Image (spheres, grey):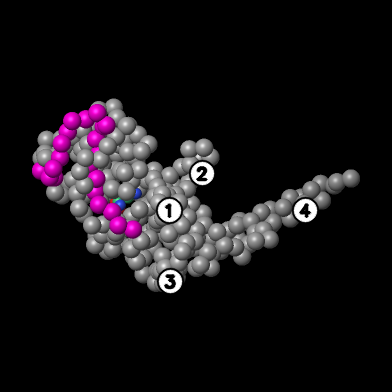
Amino acid sequence: MCTKGNLVLAGFVASVLILAVAASGCITTGTSKEKVLVVGTSADFPPFEYKDPSTGNITGFDMDLIKMVAQKAGYDRVEIKDMDFDSLIPALQTGKVDVVIAGMTITPKREQVVDFSAPYWKADQAVVVRKNSDIRVSSPDDLKGKVIGVEKGTTGALYVKNKLGNSVTMKEYNGYVAALQALLNGQVDVLVLDSPVANMFTSRYNVKVIYTIQTNEHYGIAVRKGNKELLNKINKALNEIMNSPDWNKLVAKYFGG
Ligand code: GLN
């Protein structure tokens, strides 16, 4: 039989236990020493990061790459956090994620607020239209007067803003799914986005690439500014991977060939 006194005692013991768990910040398990690399990405950028249509899991070139990097750098696993592209750098700065890998171009402006790994991929900006469109572009000037869709916070958006300014109408979208919808619906005339992703879209949607703007961009993995320890580990791992047969396998897996 349970007396009132025992109940009070049991309640007290339970509270102490709850407090102890809360204070430790986590419920520890047998694998409490597990080292987890928290990765920020924006999963609508195929083939770098996207949701597998059949499973809904986030997959892609960058995801495989960061898993390989993490393993070499001594992590047990990665945890992927998916968000809008323009939330990634703030998430890194506020410690919500440890690294960002998202086909992110190394730019001087971003380098003021985060640190980048060595480059791992090259890209330019592509001009994408509906497959049945008769828009022709043979120089960026031909974009004047057009309604241009871009993804917020990207180098494509920056290019359109800085190089074309008021001569065009720029519409910013939070993701490429929405931007593509806008193009297919006729709400915008063209999209400006990274060339490797634009090429991938041509095989999945009713769109075509009509022009490439040579912007000579390089993708890097971003870490918090001054996080030298992690950056060194990432660069070492990246260098090993890029000089191993694994690199060609990874490229073939996502780009064919
Ligand atoms: N490379 C471009 C940038 O860094 C676009 C990246 C993306 O949309 N995921 O801005």
- Tell me, for residue 69, which label it has, or none: none
Binning the other alpha carbons within 10 Å of mark 2 as few (below 14), some (14 to 19) or many (20 upward) gives few
Please state which amino acid type lies under the numbered disc 1: Ala
Q: Is mark 1 within 8 Å of ligand 1?
A: no
Residue at screen point 27% across, 63% down: 112
Residue that carries the numbered disc 3 in the rendered image:
236
Q: Residues within 10 Å of mark 1 (few under 14, many from 20)?
A: few
Task: Quickly name the residue at label 1.
Answer: 252
Query: Extreme front residue here?
Result: 257
The answer to which quarter of the image holds residue 189 is top left
**Residue at the spot x=89%, y=45% of the render?**
1
133 is within the stretch colored magenta: yes
Amino acid type at mark 2: Asn
Determine the CA span between mark 3 and mark 1. Answer: 22 Å
Q: Are marks 3 and 1 in contact (CB under 8 Å)?
A: no
x and y percentages locating residue 40 in the rendered image: 43, 53
* Mark 4 → mark 3, Cα distance in angstroms: 55 Å
Disc 4 to disc 1, how far (Cα)? Answer: 64 Å
Q: Position of residue 54 (x, y in %)?
A: 52, 37
Residue 3's x, y, as percent? Answer: 85, 47
Q: For the residues carrying marks 2 and 4, which lies nearer the camera in this image? A: 2
Residue density around tag 3, few if under 14, some if 14–19, many if 20 or more, within 10 Å: some
Instruction: Report the Cα–Cα distance between label 1 and label 2.
Output: 20 Å
Q: CA distance from mark 2 to mark 4?
A: 47 Å
Q: Residue at x 77, y 53 (%)?
A: 9
Q: Is residue 99 visible?
A: yes
Q: Which amino acid type corresponds to the residue marked 4 in the rendered image?
A: Leu
- Residue at the spot of label 4: 9
